[in-house]
Image (cartoon, grey):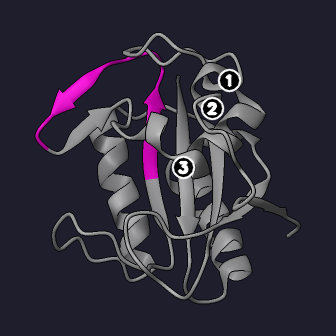
Amino acid sequence: MHQVFLGIGGNTGNKQDNFSKVYSFIKNELGEIIKQSSVYETPPWGFQSDENFWNQVLLIETEFSPLVLLEKINFIESLFGRKRDGNQYKSREMDIDILYFDNKIIEKENLTIPHPLIQLRQFVLVPLTEIAPRFIHPKLKLTSLEMIKNFSNSSAIKKIKL
C-alpha cells in the first residue's frame, strides 16, 4: 500500500455537498482516507474570482501506481465538470492534486511528484502542516512546518466547520 497526500479544493457550486461527494468518490475509487485536515476557506490563487475556495489535505492509502491514481483522479474531477483545457487557473467545483506519493520523486510529462508548487501555496501548507507537520518534502528536504515559516501572514486563511 502507498501513502498519498492529496490536496482537494473548490470554489463553485454547493461546496459542502461537493466535499461530501468527493470523500465518497475517493473512498470508492482511490483508497481509504487515513487522515484529513480541517477545511480552510482561502482566496483564489493565481487568478481572480469572486468566490473563495474551500481547501483540505487528505492522507490516503492506495494500492494504485501514481499514473493509475492520476487517471482515477481525473475521472473523479470530470464528475464535477472539470475539463482540462490548458494550464490556466479558474473556478471549479473540485480540484484534486497529488501532493506526495510515499517519498517518491516522479517527473513525467503529465505528472510531477511532489507537487511542484507545495512550498508556494499557503492554502496547501496550512492544512498539510495540521496533519503532517514533520513530513519531509523529498526534493526540498524541508518539513511542512519549515516550509510554512516562509509565510509571515495567514490571516487570509480561515478554518471553517462543515
Tell me the SS state at disc 1: helix
What span is colored magenta in the figure? Answer: 97-109
Instruction: Name the residue located 50 percent from the left edge and 47 percent from the top edge.
Output: 30
Q: Nearer the viewer, mark 1 or mark 3?
A: 1
Q: Residues within 10 Å of mark 1 (few under 14, many from 20)?
A: some
Instruction: Name the residue located 46 percent from the left edge and 30 percent from the top edge.
Output: 100
When the figure is inspected, residue 80 is found, relative to residue 115, above or below; the finding is below
Picture coordinates of residue 29, whole percent (x, y): 50, 54
Q: Residues within 10 Å of mark 2 (few under 14, many from 20)?
A: many
Residue closer to the observer: 157 or 134: 157
Say if the magenta span includes residue 32. Answer: no
Looking at the picture, which amino acid does disc 3 mark? Answer: Gly
Q: Is residue 153 left or right of residue 83?
A: right
Tell me the SS state at disc 3: strand
Badge 1 or badge 3: first in the primary sequence: 3
Spot the residue most to the left.
109
- Labelled pair 2, 1 in contact (Cβ < 8 Å): yes
Q: Residue 157: name its quadrant.
A: bottom right
Spot the residue most to the right.
161
Looking at the picture, which amino acid does disc 1 mark? Answer: Leu
Rounded to the nearest whole Å, what is the CA distance between mark 1 and mark 3?
17 Å
Instruction: Name the residue located 55 percent from the left edge and 36 percent from the top edge.
Output: 5
Picture coordinates of residue 124, whole percent (x, y): 57, 46
When the figure is inspected, residue 5 is found, relative to residue 143, above or below; the finding is below
Q: Which residue is mark 3?
A: 7
Q: Main secondary structure of the magenta part?
A: strand
Q: Which residue is mark 1?
A: 145
Q: Which residue is mark 2?
A: 148
Q: Residue 91: name its quadrant.
A: bottom left
Q: Residue 158: name its quadrant.
A: bottom right
Spot the residue most to the top.
141
